[in-house]
Image (cartoon, helix red, strand yellow):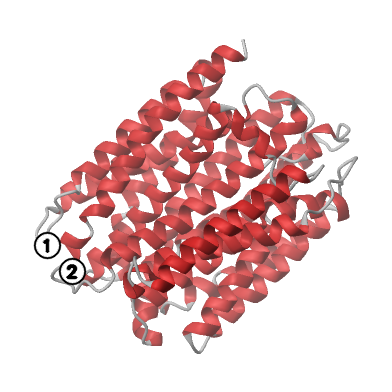
């Protein structure tokens, strides 16, 4: 996420120091990305350890992603006001302490609460770290290379989570996925104190507390209804009340944002079709990724009886596709614009989802791995052109806000994807889980097809900026 640091004065740091700053910040970003997906592969083990079902386990993932999504923008504003390094260090400390609480959690309630606090800490890392990097690199070419490295690390971290989680759980149990964060956070705190300079925006934005509260309420209600809908009934009085509250909170948020001189979210950006479709595309990509990861975990462990290690290893093709194609996509955007990589992302993701729409108990492993590879390739091609389309044609003063909204959209997509995937298979026994998951794979394919719509909009954005 970019911030008003784009207007900061040139940094006097040496080239070696600048790239050291990038390395330290990328390490923290890797931690946030891994933690978004590493828990997925351990959900069955967590369920057995704490004696909870699928619906409760969804909150273990979404308590983190919902809080992270709702606080990304305000954390960037706090960093601009009080100092980016200071807020970054606070985020690391909160994240580390919350990880310790997760590792020691005696019950589901404590684990979910600790995951929510982890989300608070993570919200101070992702946007603030990128602002630090941008501020440290005043040269546009060097900054572009740094952001390309950043995007690659982010894509790798999301895809590597299940593999890392599977290995840790096989060796040390599910609590190890949280213990891992503690030494990494300690090392990051030391490195930040030694190498990262303090910086602030020339003019900090005002905090929009009413908008922040309403955004959080909207996200919590939306995800809550999606998770609990299968249990309470989609047409039950409770569900209908939830729909009404979501609409009321959304309307309140829009009214508040339109009336503020410095809103949390610049809704005027959504009048630009390329921006609006890029934000929806970011949601779609992360819905597809998280639906794939959760359905993979539940299917392979419950239906096929695979171990967490084998389940995590099954996502290696996905991680490989994302890792190889993320930097390739960034290079294509620089040479050819966002349209071609978006088309590639959409086609690969749609084909990958379609491969599993007839998933059964005896579906061949090569077909499953091929589908994961195709989805990973689609994910790798998607991120760079989506960000480019969102900020294309905007002045620097608005590009930061556009990047922040896109980052928020990704986390919203992650939360919605987990909720939808969990709702799809909620209540299904191991024998029926494969059939129950088929609508989820259709959704993955549909998300890929939607990227073709985003590709068309990105072409009009390129025309308008010439």
Q: Quadrant of the N terminus?
A: top right
- Residue under circle 1? 361
Residue 104: x percent and y percent? 55, 85
Q: Image point 18% across, 69% down: which residue?
A: 303
Q: Residue furthest left?
A: 362
Query: Is 192 placed above or below 254 here?
Result: below
* Callout 2 crowding tier (Cα within 10 Å): few <14, some 14–19, many ≥20: some
Residue 197: x percent and y percent? 85, 49
Nearer to the camera, 30 or 379 = 379
Residue 323: x percent and y percent? 44, 41
Side (left or right) of 395 relative to 63: right
Q: Image point 69% across, 62% down: which residue?
A: 213
The answer to which image quadrant residue 456 occupies is: top left
Q: Quadrant of the C terminus?
A: top right
The reply to whether the C-beta atoms of the residues labelled 1 and 2 are less than 8 Å apart is yes
Residue 117: x percent and y percent? 63, 72
Q: Image point 27% across, 71% down: which residue?
A: 307
The answer to which image quadrant residue 249 occupies is: bottom right
Q: Residue furthest bottom?
A: 106
Question: How far apart are the alpha carbons under marks 1 and 2?
Answer: 7 Å
- Residue under circle 2? 303
First in sequence, mark 1 or 2: give its number.
2
SS category of the residue bearing label 1:
loop
Side (left or right) of 68 relative to 223: right
Side (left or right) of 433 relative to 127: left
For residue 352, the mark is none
Nearer to the camera, 64 or 247 = 247
């Amino acid at each position: 996420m970019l911030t008003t640091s784009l207007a900061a004065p040139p940094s006097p740091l040496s080239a070696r120091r600048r790239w050291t700053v990038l390395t330290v910040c990328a390490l923290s970003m890797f931690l946030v990305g891994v933690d978004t997906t590493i828990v997925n592969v351990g959900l069955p083990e967590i369920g057995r350890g704490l004696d909870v079902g699928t619906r409760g386990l969804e909150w273990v993932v979404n308590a983190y992603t919902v809080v992270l999504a709702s606080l990304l923008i305000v954390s960037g504003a706090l960093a601009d006001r009080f100092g980016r390094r200071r807020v970054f260090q606070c985020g690391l400390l909160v994240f580390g302490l919350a990880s310790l609480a997760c590792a020691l959690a005696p019950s589901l309630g404590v684990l979910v609460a600790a995951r929510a606090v982890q989300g608070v800490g993570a919200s101070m890392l992702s946007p603030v770290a990128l602002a630090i990097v941008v501020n440290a690199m005043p040269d546009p070419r060097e900054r572009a290379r740094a952001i390309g490295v950043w995007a690659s690390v982010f894509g790798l971290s999301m895809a590597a989570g299940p593999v890392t989680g599977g290995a840790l759980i096989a060796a040390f149990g599910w609590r190890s996925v949280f213990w891992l964060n503690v030494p990494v956070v300690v090392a990051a705190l030391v490195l930040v104190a030694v190498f990262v300079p303090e910086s602030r925006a020339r003019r900090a934005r005002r905090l929009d507390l009413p908008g922040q509260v309403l955004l959080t309420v909207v996200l919590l209600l939306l995800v809550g209804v999606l998770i609990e809908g299968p249990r309470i009934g989609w047409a039950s009085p409770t569900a209908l009340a939830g729909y009404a509250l979501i609409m009321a909170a959304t309307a309140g948020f829009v009214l508040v944002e339109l009336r503020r001189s410095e809103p949390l979210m610049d809704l005027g950006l959504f009048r630009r079709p390329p921006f609006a479709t890029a934000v929806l595309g970011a949601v779609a990509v992360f819905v597809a990724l998280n639906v794939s990861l959760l359905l993979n975990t539940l299917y392979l462990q419950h239906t096929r009886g695979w171990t967490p290690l084998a389940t995590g290893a099954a996502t290696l093709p996905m991680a490989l596709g994302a890792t190889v194609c993320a930097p390739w996509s960034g290079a294509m955007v620089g040479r050819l614009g966002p349209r071609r990589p978006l088309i590639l992302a959409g086609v690969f993701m749609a084909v990958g989802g379609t491969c599993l729409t007839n998933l059964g108990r005896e579906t061949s492993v090569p077909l499953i791995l091929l589908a994961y590879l195709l989805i990973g390739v689609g994910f790798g091609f998607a991120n760079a052109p989506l960000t480019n389309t969102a900020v294309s044609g905007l002045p620097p003063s608005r590009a930061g806000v556009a990047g922040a909204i896109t980052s928020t959209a990704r986390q919203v997509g992650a939360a919605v994807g987990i909720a939808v995937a969990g709702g799809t298979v909620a209540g299904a026994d191991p024998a029926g889980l494969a059939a129950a998951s088929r609508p989820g794979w259709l959704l993955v394919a549909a998300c890929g097809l939607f990227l073709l719509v985003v590709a068309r909009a990105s072409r009009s954005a390129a025309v308008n900026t010439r």
